[in-house]
Image: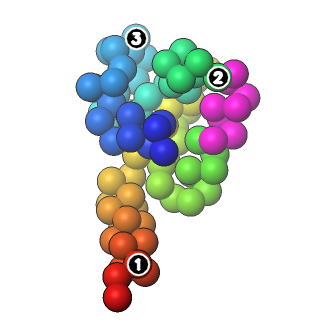
Amino acid sequence: MQMLEWLLDPTAHFPAQRDGDLVDDGVCVGAITDKIGLSQPTVTNHLRTLADAKLVTSRQIKNWVFYKADRTAVLDALTNLRSRFET
């Protein structure tokens, strides 16, 4: 959830990148790894889970993978979740 929150507002949580625009291309997995303090394989596994759930998209630029939140999918998931808890 923390990574997803950061990806929803990447410019507030990550510095500019040499390759790839934070907003247009997403955040490099290396920057996410540095920020969260976990190993790169662990971060990649969590991001793959989010990608499998269609909450983020990934894009390869050069040798790096960049992740971007799918705002519409996140909003749809939250709306669906909220409706399940309403009486």
Residue placed under numbered mark 2 in the picture: 38
Instruction: For residue 29, say whether it is visible.
Output: yes
Q: Amino acid at mark 3?
A: Arg
> Do the numbered discs 3 and 1 sit on residues whose CB atoms are within 8 Å?
no
Q: Quadrant of residue 4?
A: top left
- Other-residue count near label 3 (Cα within 10 Å), few / some / many at <14 / 14–19 / ≥20: few
As for residue 17 lying within the magenta part, the answer is no
Q: Quadrant of residue 80?
A: bottom left
Number of the label disc, if any, that sits on residue 18 = 3
Observer-side mark, 2 or 3, equals: 2
What is the span of residues highlighted in magenta in the rendered image?
A: 39-46
Q: Secondary structure at mark 3?
A: loop
- Main SS of the magenta part reads helix
**N-term-proximal mark, 3 vs 1:** 3
> Where residue 27 sits: x, y (%)?
44, 28
Residue beneath the point at 59% across and 41% down: 47
> Where residue 17 sits: x, y (%)?
38, 15
> Going by the picture, which residue comes out furthest to the top?
18
- Other-residue count near label 1 (Cα within 10 Å), few / some / many at <14 / 14–19 / ≥20: few
